[in-house]
Amino acid sequence: MKSSNAMPSAFGWDFQSNAAIMLMLKNIVKASKVKVEGQSEDVEITFTDGKMLLSQVKAVVKPDDYSHVKEKLEAGLRTLTNASKLADVKQLVFVTNSPNPFNDTTTMFKFSSPLNIVPFSELPTACQQTISDICTSKEYDFDTALLTVCVMQFHGENEDERYKVLSTLTTEFLNNLGVHKISTNQLLTLWQHSFAVNASQLTTSITKKRMVWPVIAILCEVGEDDAELVDYDESDVVEILQKYRSVINNNSENFEFISRVLSDNNEFHPEMKSKERTKKFIEDNWENYKDFFDLKSADSTTIEMVIQLTVTNVLRSRKVIAEIKGKVKL
Amino acid sequence: MRIVSLKVNANQLTLLGENQKVFLFEENVNIVFSTKNSVGKTTLLRLLMYSLGYPIPSTRGIRFSDYETILTVVGANDEIFVLTRNRDYIEVLHNKEEKGYSLPVEQNELHSSIYGITNLEAVDNLLGAFFVDQEKGWTLLNRGKAIGNIHFSIESLLRGLSNRTNNELAQRLAVVKREIQKYKHMLDIAAYKAEINRLGETSFINSPADDIENALEVLYCERKPLEEELSRIKSVIRKNTNFEKFITSFKLRVKASNGDEVPVNKDTLIGYGDTADLLVAKQKINYEQLAAIDRKIALLKAQQDDEATLIDVKTSLQQFDSEIAKINVDAMATQKIIVKLEKERKILEERVINSVKQNNPLIGELHQLISSYAARLGLDERYVSARNDYIFTNDLKSLSGAIYHKVVFAFKISYVKLIQQHTGVYLPFILDSPSGREVSMENINEMMAILAEDYAGHQIIIASIYNSYAFPNKNIIELQDRLLPF
């Protein structure tokens, strides 16, 4: 997805799928899935209540080339008119990366931020007039109150530059979740690849679930967080994790084991406060799970550490899953 | 020391039934004679030295290692030694005692016992003194190779005879010489490298093909743990699915506290959905990482295919060049080291020579012997200088063939005489084809006369196409057709 000049269609797809991510992130609480149609330059977001956001995405390869922006606007409005006829539509969005979507330099100030999302009512009068003129001459009839114009900066060969807006949005998303240990880049790349895998089909549908669960998965990775409740030397933990990571994972991902631990934990001193309760639970119960672990060659301290880390990870993962799911209404 | 007899046995049985040949040698003069050339005179002389335990190169047509040789000599203290040699093993029967020696490791020890000379440096230089081979013997004056790789050095001989062997010095010199050799090889490599650089043939040294190969290697290394993790996740998913199916198969129903009946299945098992989603997400992350690597691999492989169609597989010469180019040799530094070592070698050699030369009466004696014999052969001071250190001369090229021949003869017999005077050992004197090289019959006769007069106590063995040399009691060993009929 690099050379924009040689491959305008690849560039267009890149912009479209990133626009889809942007729209999802902007609507993450209410949205349930996003569909990208390459052929018609559509991005559709379905909300949990069944209502839809329909979007037309038009990319310009050179940001300072305004020669075709009006045509693109017209084409976009035509498609959006047709879309507006569908039931359940509650928002129409025209997305572009041109800083001058109306080919009117006097209105450019309105689109000069990295990301500008402007409802019809807030557009400069000249822009409103342009849209009305197009609709009149082409006999497009849709409720302009549904329309939003969105300009997202997206250009340059350098990925850091091109994906600047997306990076900011992703970081914001992670901040809202209260997540700090996941790299923005890692997550964004993962999302972008989710679209890229299906680029050849030119139609991709991605659910919120698929976007959010990787975050949970990364957060649930067994790590030093799981050693917080138990008093171990940091370097010992690092060594154990290095050697026994797959043993820990095999159990912390095993539903039978998870059920045992969660049930035991549920019944354990419900009157105690959460943190002390978990700590005591681990101390009192870890030996009950020895059967799940096959650690013949390890010494007793190691066995204790491995089992305690696994149990902690199971309990922590439950908490993480509930937290994140609650925050994004999954 | 003198040779009594040589018996040659074929190691393999032959069709002719005859598989043994014996040559007998008399105490005084023996002429190995044949009217024709190429019947084995040189071979017989070399075979004598071989059977004595020397590393003698085979002559054309006869490989010495194919035979067992049994040599009988009168050695130290006028006692009989019988030496049986099979390849690199020689067995010595002496005083009814048998002793085995491995060659070439125990060669000096063997010879020391047979000759009765204890100084090993002297022993090491005997052959060059008494054996004048047809090929190299007549060009060897005071240092060089006597035959094959057997060295002779006048300094070394004199050191041995005067018991002035300085091992430390000699060893250091040997080390320096070896190092010089090695550095010269290094310099060759540097020159080779410079050559391929000059010709601009180094483009393939860090070729794109190599880079691609390396990059692929790294990617495969990164891929492996991801692949293992992916299969681990898959197996956990399978395990969980089986567990859920097992539970669901019981068709259990439970009653909630509000009285609702709830079927037990994957939708109602608390935490099951989360666990499944978590694993799917983990698998997804893992799959993405793998896919990213695979994309890179595919890209590199495509490049590799492109290259393969453009360039032929490296020839072994190119491969060699590329290996050489990787070797880092600093030609300038190497050159400097060689110069330094050469200086050290010269100094060491001078010290070695000086250690022999200083206050050594043997030099005078040897010079006296050589000058007097040279004079008898008609060579005056123009050829053989009156200065004592003439015997260490390096200036040989200026001498013409016939004169050189006579100078060599004078030197050799003088060595034999000097050895006799200082060790009491009467070495045999073995000459191959003394009549060659533009030497007049008159001179030959003079040489033979010297031998007859001054070397009566020594055994003399001469190989020649003449048998007319004037010796009383000469024993003629005539060779006809082939030396060994098997």
Image: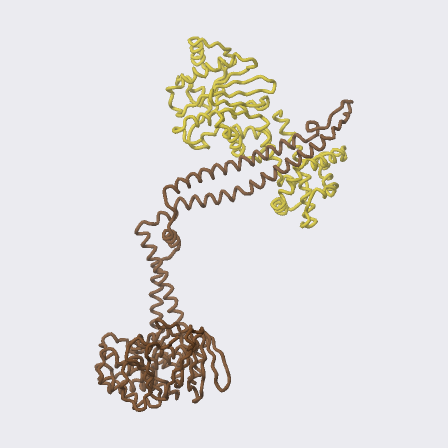
Q: Is residue B66 visible?
A: yes
Please tell me whether residue A134 is drawn above or below residue B196 in the rendered image: above
Left or right: where A191 falls relative to B471: right
In the displayed structure, would residue A278 be above or below residue B104? above
**Residue A26 appears at what percent x and percent y?**
54, 23
Colour scheme in the image?
Answer: by chain
Q: Which chain: yellow?
A: A
Q: Nearer the viewer, residue B93 or B384?
A: B93
Looking at the image, which residue sits at the far front?
A: B16
- Residue shown at the point (60%, 32%) measured from the top left: B280
Q: Quadrant of the C terminus of chain A?
A: top right
Most foreground residue, A32 or B112 = B112
Q: How far across and down, in percent of the image, does residue A36 sit?
A: 51, 23
Residue closer to the observer: A76 or A146: A76
Task: Report which quarter residue A109 is drawn in.
Answer: top left
The picture's colour for chain B is brown
As drawn, A313 above or below B28: above
Report the label total. Answer: 0
Residue B397, located in which quarter of the rendered image?
bottom left
- Residue B305, image x and y in percent? 41, 40
User: Does residue B390 show up?
Assistant: no
**Figure quadrant of the N terminus of chain A:** top left
Measuring from the top left, give residue A162's x and y in whole percent.
45, 29
